[in-house]
Amino acid sequence: KKDGPSLDLHRILANDCHSNWLELPRQRRLHPTMMEVEENEVEMASTTLICDTQPWKDLKAHVEDIKKTHLRDLMNDKERCESMMVEFDGMFLDYSRQCATLDTMAKLYKLAEAASLKQQINRMYSGEHINSTENRSVLHVALRAPRDAVINSDGKNVVPDVWNVLDKIRDFSEKVRSGSWVGATGKPLKDVIAIGIGGSFLGPLFVHTALQTDPEAVEFAKGRQLRFLANVDPIDVARSIAGLNPETALVVVVSKTFTTAETMLNARTIREWISSALGPSAVAKHMVAVSTNLTLVEKFGIDPNNAFAFWDWVGGRYSVCSAVGVLPLSLQYGFSIVEKFLKGASSIDDHFRSAPFEKNIPVLLGLLSVWNVSFLGYPARAILPYSQALEKFAPHIQQVSMESNGKGVSIDGVPLPYEAGEIDFGEPGTNGQHSFYQLIHQGRVIPCDFIGIVKSQQPVYLKGEVVSNHDELMSNFFAQPDALAYGKTAEQLLKENVSQHLIPHKTFSGNRPSLSLLLPSLGAYNIGQLLASYEHRVAVEGFVWGINSFDQWGVELGKSLATQVRKQLHASRTKSEPVEGFNFSTTKLLTRYLQ
Ligand code: F6P
């Protein structure tokens, strides 16, 4: 590049000894950590990075125009605001508080065209192997497709397989719930422990937490409980079984691979809990599994008839609509509630595939994220549901977004000269307001997603109060975005007779972007809509950034180093072998731990 390598390249070059990296032939310009790969083994498609396209350059230049604007003024333009409001199937998105004009949006649509966004979405729905590093289709949309839909992967319609498993879950969960499937001592199984981690945990936990207070779902869950066991920390084991009787417990081991170290150890621990209380044969009645690896399920000792399959075209973090979520949730709430959840997600799937970009909620969300991250330079996003029932939404989206888009190379292995991915975090309002909002209002600029619900799941109207409890909550939902957008000027403070020395402390710069998403209620259907909107938003970002949003190689290195440590701990504990083969720091730490 004429103006020298970008910051990113500086970082790579500074951190690595491959300072002649730019001089290498293009097909060898992989990330320096991959340089041991033989030249003739490296096959690279010739890639045009999105940052080399004219729409990207136009947006870069446009940032200067936007810097001259302030949301205080932009919000006065009624026509602009009206064009920045979109409604679909009861969901209402208002993105008028983004630091963007209609010109910005037009430029973002051009960027989407340059990234072949429409074609990429179509490739996903038609089962192409867009997860190229794992040579897999990406078809979580098939998990919630209607029974008569046709969605092909490798020339085969996968929808009948999906419905075979759904029907099997319906039958099994009805048997358990009605008490016709009983435990080893003849007692009905009313407590479910779902063992799994990452995508085999966070999505189901989010949906369960949201349904837990939904009046319709509550009715169906009477007398039952659903618990999760994710962390390999023995404390989590203790918590998951505290107060439970193995005689009434059903354990669902959820693991796509059935090899994840934490899940398998937890599964062995809970198997021991069951068999020591009820005898080894009780496992057949008390343990079932969800996996793509049915061979390992059987090897573990779970009856293959009690295994619920899914497929390698479902990414772990996109698997909540497969048996991963559907089985535990159906056991707790009944299949009919879960079916509504699937229908809500399916409604957004259709919308995402067919709506024009200007009216397409996931596309708009995705393009705005790219705008905030790659052009305005805001690397984080706060997910702020004004609903306690959505308290596990941000942790789930954290995985969906950060595991999907936290990548350093393009889909063809070219180091990205721009940052991709964003840092997601969040808490329900109003709790978050009393925690980290100070930073959002006067410290760093963090684009916020405000998610509000029109009708509360559990309304309270206290006599003598000015507004209902839900109105009180929503007063904050409506106020916060304006506080961020408008801020408060020194002139305003002067008029309020604020002492001079406090003015800098009490000034709010404003011009802080947010978007507001309003859902009519939080039933199973709406939860499905919300989930699918965010899943597709992440895909849009990845498609535009030109990365593979569907692999997760970045989690492997830590796992393999843990294997080496595990071996060492075993050798030291059983044969008193000294700590060997680690760097000075890790050796010291391990030795101290062992002592
Ligand atoms: O954290 C890495 C990961 O592979 C996730 O992608 C996945 O959701 C999780 O581990 C659990 O994997 P599995 O379902 O195979 O146990």
Image: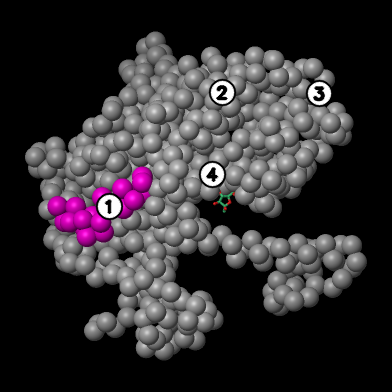
Mark 2 to mark 3 CA distance (whole Å): 22 Å
Does any portion of residue 451 appear in the rendered image? no
What residue is shown with label 3?
184
Task: Bin the neighbour count of mark 3 within 10 Å (Cα to Cα): few under 14, some 14-19, many 20 and up.
Answer: some
Which is more N-terminal, label 3 or label 2? 2
Badge 2 density bin: few <14, some 14–19, many ≥20, Cα 10 Å: many
Question: Can you say which quadrant of the picture contains the C terminus?
Answer: bottom right
Q: Label 2 vs label 1: CA separation?
A: 36 Å
- The magenta span reads 106-126
Q: Amino acid at mark 4?
A: Trp
C-alpha separation, residue under disc 4 versus residue under disc 2: 19 Å
Question: Is residue 113 positioned above or below 537 on the image?
Answer: below
Give the SS element for disc 2. Answer: helix
Reply yes or no: does residue 30 show up in magenta.
no
The answer to whether residue 304 is seen in the rendering is: yes
- Dot 3: element: loop
Q: Are marks 2 and 3 in contact (CB under 8 Å)?
A: no
The residue that appears at 85% across and 66% down in the rendered structure is: 572
Residue with the mark numbered 2? 170
At 45% from the left and 43% from the top, the residue drawn is 156
**Residue 239, percent across and down?**
70, 36
Tell me which label, 4 or 2, sits earlier in the chain: 2
Helix, strand or loop under label 4? loop
Q: Is residue 117 magenta?
A: yes
The label shown at residue 311 is 4
Point out which mark residue 119 bears: 1
